[in-house]
Image (tube, rainbow, N blue to C red):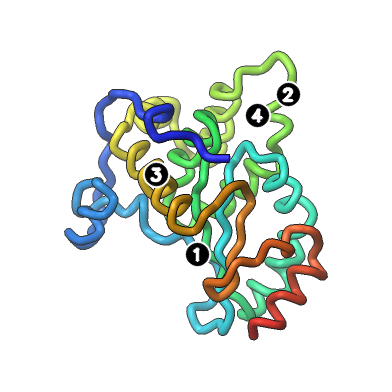
Amino acid sequence: MTLGRRAFLVAGPAFVAVTSLSSAHAEETGLPAGDTRMGPRVLGSPEAKVQVDEWFSMTCSHCAHFAQTVFPQVKANLIDTDKIRYRYHDFPLDQIALLAAMVARSLPADRYAPFVDDLLRTQDQWAFAQNIDPMQELKKRAALAGISATDFDKINADNALREAIVNRQDRDGAFLQIHGTPYFRINDAPAPDVVSSYDAFAKAVAKAS
């Protein structure tokens, strides 16, 4: 499922990154020129013949199951061996998943994937455990990744980043007809069966090679 953009957007001051991006990118995302947070988040060689794209939500139990049971083999056997290039797409299904995506995108690009992996692998601990506040648990996870409590609060108040993620999600969801997560494409073709097992994933990659 997807949630309407109005459910996500709340007023607040902007927290602005400082490395350079083109004005065209700034226009697309609605973020200031020089803000890299909505740039590509990718693992693997740019020379790989196969590109895998995943749309995921940090609070999606199916996404967590994939991260825990299939992705480790994908990374070891396909990404680290330069057989595939793996690109992440945020597709948050609720407020806490959106904030988690905002935090992940506020990290340096090379720390995005490890943080996402950590959150998905420990989802039951920080998002769904009994008698916990998911936002406070996310704040603790962010601190372990090097984001101070002050910066976490700035990220949470950054309506510009929040809107950029939701706008991209709305656009992808409408254009690609994404109805649930995780959603995969291999070389830009839908790959609905790869989530079931590593063997299914590897078979689909081999077919696309």
Question: Element under label 2?
Answer: loop
The residue pinned by badge 2 equals 129
Separation of marks 2 and 1 at Cα, in angstroms: 30 Å
* Label 4 crowd (10 A; few <14 / some 14-19 / many >=20): many
* Label 3 crowd (10 A; few <14 / some 14-19 / many >=20): many
The dot on residue 205 is: none
Q: Residue at x 71, y 75 (%)?
A: 204
Separation of marks 4 and 2 at Cα, in angstroms: 6 Å
Query: Looking at the rendering, in which quadrant would you find the N terminus?
Result: top right
Separation of marks 3 and 1 at Cα, in angstroms: 17 Å
Q: Pointer 4 and pointer 2: residues touching (CB < 8 Å)?
A: yes
The residue pinned by badge 4 equals 127
Question: Element under label 3?
Answer: helix
Residue type at the position of mark 3: Ile
Residue type at the position of mark 4: Ala
The residue pinned by badge 3 equals 165
The residue pinned by badge 1 equals 42
Q: Quadrant of residue 34?
A: bottom left
Separation of marks 4 and 3 at Cα, in angstroms: 20 Å
Label tally: 4
Q: Quadrant of residue 14?
A: top left
Q: Residue at x 76, y 65 (%)?
A: 73
Given this view, does label 2 or label 3 mark the residue nearer the observer?
3
Residue type at the position of mark 1: Val
Residue type at the position of mark 2: Ala
Which circle's residue, 2 or 3, is located before the other in the chain? Answer: 2
- Give 39 or 136, whichever is nearer the viewer: 39
* Label 1 crowd (10 A; few <14 / some 14-19 / many >=20): some
Question: Element under label 1?
Answer: strand
